[in-house]
Amino acid sequence: MDTSEVIKEVFQKVLKIEDKGKLASYIPELALVDSRKIGVHICTTSNLSFGLGDFREKFSIQSIAKVFSLCLAYKMLGEDIWARVGVEPSGTGFNSLIQLENDNGKPRNPFINAGAIVISDILLSSLTNPKDDLLAFVRSLSTNQDINYSAKISASEKSIGYRNVAMCNFIKSLGNIDNEPSEVLDFYFDLCSLELSCKHLSELFLFLANQGKTMHDNTQILTKSQTKRINALMQTCGFYDESGDFAFKVGMPGKSGVGGGIIAIHPNEYSIAVWSPKLNKKGNSYKGMMFLEQFTTLSELSIF
């Protein structure tokens, strides 16, 4: 059975399953999303591009965007970046404050909120026009230029972002934020407001399945070694405190967002994006997780 046929079969199965998840209603704009939406799109290194369902519809990618900011910071700073942020699974929620004091303000990894806030601080210090430069970087990863921040989503997050404000100020007090917390948070909230479709996501992430090189113009975004490390971090830390479960059931590097999106990478083979807005108790897409588990099981394609 070829890849597109596997996707069709699994998609039909997952459509029929009762969705026991809930929308991320603590962010007002995300509470308004049609919870019945579901889409999937795959891009392969052998030039297959295939999607089903609502794969062309844009949604808020939320924490998936943290991979973009990390890649840009890593590209610019190299290994020095790990002096500011760790590479260990957190074992706690994505917005936990617990470990920061014990670890002297160094977040466990770049994908929890604290880690992404420190990466945002690094980019603010390193870029001339941080928001524009990040957007230009993301756009450079594919031929799609229709990529932007959402002012509505960003404003919605800022209106309830008290915990992130506390976190940023706490890290600042421990000496691991260089810029003004208000500026760091403004950048961070915009970063998380990026809107993309499943098709966009699978195209943009394909360079991580292609040894760090874009497919459309053969640009080396990250070295092979850096690409390996980004994929390793997604494998161990990409799903908050459900990362081990995802590795066990799906067996691929990936990253989720509370907008209901998931991107997953099979090195040298493909990138696949799934979107279904209702989340499980860990903050990951209920049907998205189910789809990817069944997809790798039926296709027998995982990294293990």
Image (cartoon, rainbow, N blue to C red):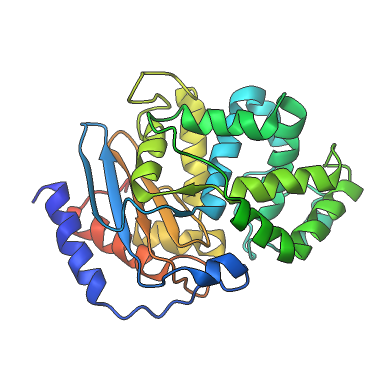
Q: Where is residue 63 in the image (x, y as percent from the top left)?
A: 56, 52
Q: Which residue is drawn at 50% across and 25% down?
A: 222
Q: Which residue: 30% across, 33% down?
A: 268
Quadrant position of residue 14:
bottom left
**Closest to the observer: 151 or 115?**
151
Would you say 171 lies left or right of 111 here? right
Where residue 36 appears, x then y in whole percent? 35, 72
Number of on-image labels: 0
**Residue 148 appears in the picture as rendered:** yes
Residue beneath the point at 56% across and 60% down: 240
Residue 99, percent from left and from top: 76, 59
* Image x and y of residue 146, in percent: 44, 37
Q: Residue furthest front?
A: 152
Taking the image as shown, residue 171 lies to the left or right of residue 253, namely: right
User: In the image, 102: left or right of 157?
Assistant: right
Q: Residue at image x 54%, y 72%?
A: 31
